Every structure is written in C-alpha cells, then in structure tokens.
Image (cartoon, rainbow, N blue to C red):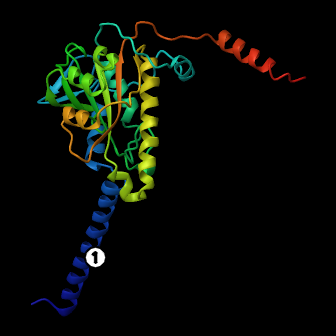
Amino acid sequence: MLKPSTYRQVIMFLSYATLALVVIGSILVYLDLVLGLRITNILVTEKEIIEEDLGEEVVKAGNIILLPLPRLKGNMSLEESIAYRRSIREYLDKPLTLNQLSQLLWAAQGLTELKWGFRASPSAGATYPLEIYVVVAENGVEGLEPGIYHYDPYTHTIRLTRKGDFVDELYEACLRQPWVKEAPVNIVIVAEYERTTRVYGERGIRYVHIEVGHVGQNIYLEATALGLGTVAIGAFYDNQVREILGLPPNYHPLYVMPVGVPVKPYRISEQELWKAITENREKLNIKP
C-alpha cells in the first residue's frame, strides 16, 4: 500500500496537471474564438514556407490548389502603385497567371506574421471577419478550371467549392455591369459579422466595413503593381451573390472586384503631378 504522503503527492500532481491543461485550453480557445487564429494552420504554413518554392505549375491535392508562394518584391514601388491606381473597367481577353492570382490573394488576406497569424490588412482585435472567394471564368486563370474558389490565408491555397463558369450568373447579380462579365476573375469579399461583433458589439459592424476598405485598397494596389486593373463594386443583389457562391446565411458579400489585364493602364508622371500641384498653389496667392 502507498503511504498517505504518497497519495497526497499523486493528488497534488494530478491537480497541477489538470490546472495546466485548463490554462492551455483557455489560451487556445481565446486565440481561436477571439483572435480567429488557427495554430495548426500557422505551423503548417511555416513548414511549407521553408520547404516549398512553387512556380507556375499547378499543384493540386483533390480540390485544393497550392498557390505559388507570395513574393515580397515587385517591379513597381508603392508610390508608383498609389499614383497609377485607378478603377479600371475595360480588360483584354487575356487570362491571369497563377502567380498573379497568388499575389492578389496574398495582398488581400495573406499571412504576414507567423507568431500570431496576422494578415496583410488590419483587423479590429485580429478577429478577421472576412473571407475571400474567387469566381474564375472559362480560361480565366492559366491552368485553373472555371469555378468558385475559397482562399485559405494560412496555407496560401485555394479550394474549389463549385465547378463551372458562374460569370454570367454573377453578371446578372451585379446588375449587369459589363466589367463583371468581361473580367477573367472576380474576387468577392465576404463578411461574417459575428466574429467581430461578439467582441465589440454593434460597433463591430463599423469595424468590418472599415476592414473591407483596407482589403479592397490592397487589391487595388497589388493589381496595379502587377500590371492589372480592377474596380470595387458594391451594387449587387446580396442574396443572389450568396446563392452563387453557395454561402451560409450568416455570410454577407460586401465587395465584388473584377480583375483583368487593362486595355489602357493609367499612368501619370512625376513632372505632371508636380506641375498640377504648383499651379494649384499659385491660386493660394501665398507670398514668400
């Protein structure tokens, strides 16, 4: 038989072990429910970043497509992207490359910090209420079949959720705006408000709308840097877009962003910009 002191030691050990598990469990629940983090996904993503170096080849595992890994350097400065950014509504009949799609999705919601899983755009309390879907037309992206894809920022993959060309249906849902139909790709930004409102209450609705603006601008700037064009669309029938994407009732589409190779990219020179600002300053009649 064990001595009473030994029983006490065993009970104390079990008590401390139980307490430690409760604390660890509480931390994981907080990270999951409040911050929206997926620890296992972060670890997998870090491993893939170290081991993988994907090019243009389409790597598939069932309905999951591994996107080329995001690049942190491009051919255009941030300042140039800001200056050249415009809403572009006319596109060439030319598909996007898989690398271009990869960069666009990473700029929208991609992973930018490995410890906490923070993403490319700011989010109130890191609640990340937004989901990114891509409607790919026939021959819309080189190597991808037409369909609707859902982006996973932690593994930088897209998952085919619906097969087929849904561009005509999306065009109808977007009040027949022709650029939706002409674009090879339409990025749809969707919100689940509860992820943010359960932390911030009704004010969280405002935070979600602020966040979708951040994401939209990221897509604008990345598209410009890639030599592409896009336009943010807010005029559409919510229920029709939700039905096309196959979304649950608590998912709300906020933006539809057609993306394509522009017929005529917008450009402005530094000299033109300076000249315009100088002429406007002269109207102020400020004496040196």
In the image, residue 169 above or below residue 200: above
Compare residues 280 and 217 and report the one nearer the observer: 280
Coordinates of residue 150 in the picture (x, y in percent): 24, 33
Q: Quadrant of residue 282?
A: top right
Which residue carries the number 1 mark?
A: 16
**Rendered image quadrant of residue 101:** top left
Query: Horizontal placement of 284 versus 127: left or right?
Result: right
Q: Residue at x 34, y 52 (%)?
A: 195
* Residue 202 drawn above or below residue 140: below
Residue 288 appearing in the image: no
Q: Tell me the residue at 18%/36% (across/down).
A: 246
User: Where is residue 51 drawn, in percent x and y?
Assistant: 27, 31
| Residue 179, position as x, y percentages in the image | 34, 17
246 or 173: nearer the eye?
173
What amino acid type is highlighted by mark number 1? Answer: Tyr
Mark yes or no: residue 116 visible. yes
